[in-house]
Image (spheres, rainbow, N blue to C red):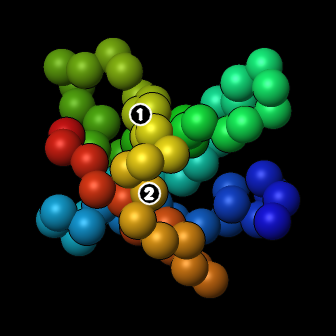
Amino acid sequence: MRLSDLQHKDVINIKDGKKIGNIIDVMIESNGTMVGLIVEKSRFLVSMFSNKDEIIINWNQIEKIGEDVILVTISL
């Protein structure tokens, strides 16, 4: 699977069923291991009180990568 394939999938939080956002980048260790995803928050989650519009999702928080979505477990 390519990064471009992942970027077209919605990231959904299993805890509440809400869309978190879309992948904009990945985190890779120096040995080439992918350790996480950087997700741009959907406009629903962006608050005027928050200046952070990205969420880092660690690889162990990913539950399932499907055809259209990536299911994660994360507390926001």
Spatial separation of the CA atoms under disc 2 and disc 1? 13 Å
Residue 57 place in picture, x, y as percent:
44, 40
Q: Quadrant of the N terminus?
A: bottom right
**Whole-percent x and y of residue 56?**
45, 33
Work out whether mark 2 precedes mark 1 in sequence or the reverse, and give the earlier one. 1
Q: Nearer the viewer, residue 41 or 33?
A: 33
Q: Is residue 63 visible?
A: yes
Q: Quadrant of residue 35?
A: top right
Closer to us: 25 or 47:
25
Q: What residue is shown with label 1?
A: 55
What residue is rendered at 71% in x and 24% in y? 29
Categorize mark 1 by other alpha carbons within 10 Å: few (<14), some (14-19), many (20+).
some
- Secondary element at tag 2: strand
Tally of marks: 2
Q: Nearer the viewer, mark 2 or mark 1?
A: 2
Question: Mark 2, residues whose alpha carbon is within 10 Å: few (<14), some, or many (≥20)?
Answer: some
Q: Callout 2, which amino acid?
A: Ile
Q: Is residue 40 visible?
A: no
- Which residue, given by chain and number where applicable, does mark 2 sit on? 62
Q: Is residue 55 above or below residue 20?
A: above
Q: For this view, does 3 lie left or right of residue 60?
A: right
| Quarter residue 28 falls in | top right
Image-based side of 43 in relation to 50, left or right: right
Residue 15 position (above or below residue 27): below
Q: Amino acid at mark 1?
A: Ile
Say which mark, if any, is on residue 12. Answer: none
Direction front: furthest residue: 31
Residue at horizontal 19%, vertical 40%?
76
Q: Is disc 1 placed on a helix, strand or loop? A: strand
- Residue occupying the point 18% across, 19% down: 49
Q: Is residue 14 left or right of residue 16?
A: right
